[in-house]
Image: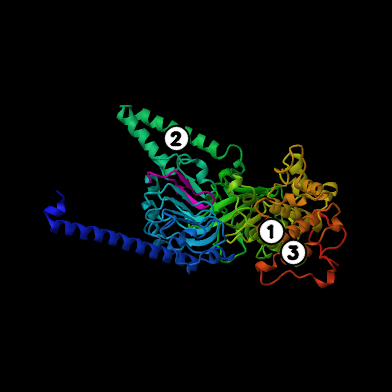
Amino acid sequence: MALSEKNPMVAAHILVWMVLVLLSSRITLIDATATDIECLKSIKDSLVDPYNYLNTTWDFNNNTEGFLCRFMGVECWHPDENRVLNIRLSDLSLKGQFPLGIQKCTSLTGLDLSRNKLFGSIPANISKLLPYVTNLDLSFNNFSGGIPLNLANCSFLNDLKLDNNRLTGNIPLEFGLLDRIKIFTVTNNLLSGPIPNFIHSNIPVDSFANNLDLCGKPLKLCPGVQRKSHVGVIAAAAAGGITFTSIICGIFLYYLSRGVAKRKADDPEGNRWAKSIKGTKGIKVSMFEKSVSKMRLSDLMKATSDFSNNNIIGAGRTGPMYKAVFSEGCFLMVKRLQDSQRLEKEFVSEMNTLGNVKHRNLVPLLGFCVAKKERFLVYKFIENGTLYDKLHPLEPEIRNMDWPLRLKIAIGTARGLAWLHHNCNPRIIHRNISSKCILLDGDFEPKLSDFGLARLMNPIDTHLSTFVNGEFGDLGYVAPEYLRTLVATPKGDVYSFGVVLLELITGEKPTHVANAPESFKGSLVEWIKQLSHGPLLHTAIDKPLPGNGYDHELNQFLKVACNCVVENAKERPTMFEVHQLLRAIGERYHFTTDDDIMLPSDTGDTAFPDELIVATEVTKEVE
């Protein structure tokens, strides 16, 4: 017999209960749909969408069931429900801060905002915004500030990608307790301190590369960890009943051996020269910027760990560049100028000249220091490293440079170089142009480094010695006439810059062309010239670039690059002309609103005389 037949009142209560359950679930679904709509509207309103990806694909006037699920980058739990499961908005050039309205997507488990132009800090309460997130990718943006400790409360995280930003401070050690984590990357940031010990995952060492000063297994040992291990050794020895004398001897030998090992690891060859100048630590660093704190050589040595090889962030023909980290959180770059032939008085005079050379596309020279035979230059720290590293990362698949960004870098670099050639007083030939000397700031505005250093160097030492020693890394940038005459000219800079333009549009290295046939052993310029004799020149363009509405700009850009690297120096354009041509190509992007490069009226079509200019006289004024 049915329950309803025995007790109609019970059956009625059950029926009412079932109706209420169904109704409540329906109300929950409607509320979830409404909040998800508000979530996506908020994201759309809070971000600048320069190419109208969201404006053209996110249509909120459509009220059909599951309409959100057809939005670009939106995945739903079910195609007929407007409950958002994942949001993937990678590589859309979106600008703005982290969209706080994301918390209204109450069922969200995956968020990918990578490869955009987002800035500001990661929200401190991010676990409340994304309580169920399993995959979070904020890589390749301009996020700054610290990594929030609150992120460790996102206990469902499997993948966390924060690489290629400007994050500072420590990595919260609580991340090690995330028992589901499989992928964790913070490469190319400004992080320091110990890294978490992930108890359930084996995070590779590459996930921490290119930061200021991270330590801990599998990286170098942290100083605090070393001290702790020493205490452990002492305690174990005492517990074993070893005599006091043997303990002291053991500790002494242990410290001695560890100290020797550490010195060898930190300095296998290299910074022994730094020990010879320790007696000059009190020497003042001459600073051009009043806003920069006064400092001494001892401050530079401490900030670079006595110019340890571990602190080298770049090396050019004029010397290595060191990362300098000061206790108050200030970051600078220090170049050790090698093989300078100038006497101290001449060097100081040249420094005072270069210290007054200021332009938005030049790395600011903040000061200098002379200690015995050593010469040090102090520069402003530039966050995003070199153009070379961005174009040729160790893992090619992580390269993320769309065409507008490449064009912006080319125009800015051309502006700085043209200003050196045509408007700087005195005029300066760079003579060492390469993608390694073009640094990128937080907004990816290019900054030329090493400008004017040719004035301080022995011309034969700074050029031929590089090649004679078998280091051909920069040979692909050198104008052919220089190899014949050893005479630097403005058109030599134009040639080198043309090679940089070819790097930007092809994605290839100057001396190793990956897309060329195996039998081809020449340089990038030789490869381009080989292709230009047939209809295949367009095949040299980096594969991700064509077909995105930029094809005309790409062809014009390639023509400019090819004109810069013609064999006959007289047939190359001036840097003023190169800058104007590139500005015309990028006119629709409005990268600049003014033009500070003016061709001097008294010099015809060039700011230099037609005759060749000897490298040590590159600032000779035109009579």
Mark 1 and mark 3 lie on one chain; the one further toward the N terminus is 1
- Quadrant of the image occupied by residue 549: bottom right
Q: Position of residue 510 (x, y in %)?
A: 72, 47
Callout 1: few (<14), some (14-19), or many (20+) C-alpha neighbours within 10 Å? Answer: some
Which label sits in the foreground, 2 or 3? 3
Tell me the residue at 43%/65% (across/down): 37
Q: Taking 399 as reference, is 339 left or right?
A: right
Q: Taking 203 as reference, is 360 left or right?
A: right
- Residue sitting nearer the eye, 119 or 190: 119
Read off the residue under disc 3: 579
Read off the residue under disc 2: 255
Q: Which part of the image, by quadrant, shows the C terminus?
A: bottom right
Q: Is residue 184 magenta?
A: yes
At label 3, which amino acid type do we have?
A: His
Which mark identifies residue 348?
A: 1
- Residue sitting nearer the eye, 71 or 439: 71
Q: Where is residue 57 in the image (x, y as percent from the top left)?
A: 54, 63
Q: Is mark 2 on a helix, strand or loop?
A: helix
Task: Find the distance from the CA under tag 1 to the CA under tag 2.
Answer: 43 Å
At label 1, which amino acid type do we have?
A: Val
Q: Position of residue 181 (x, y in %)?
A: 42, 45
Tell me if residue 373 can be seen: no
At label 2, which amino acid type do we have?
A: Tyr
Which label sits in the foreground, 1 or 3? 3
What span is in magenta?
A: 178-195
Which label sits in the foreground, 1 or 2? 2
> Is label 1 in contact with label 2 (beta carbons under 8 Å)?
no
Q: Is mark 1 on a helix, strand or loop?
A: helix
Which mark identifies residue 544?
A: none
Q: Position of residue 517 (x, y in %)?
A: 74, 40
Task: Find the distance from the CA under tag 2 to the CA under tag 3.
Answer: 59 Å
Q: Is residue 462 magenta?
A: no
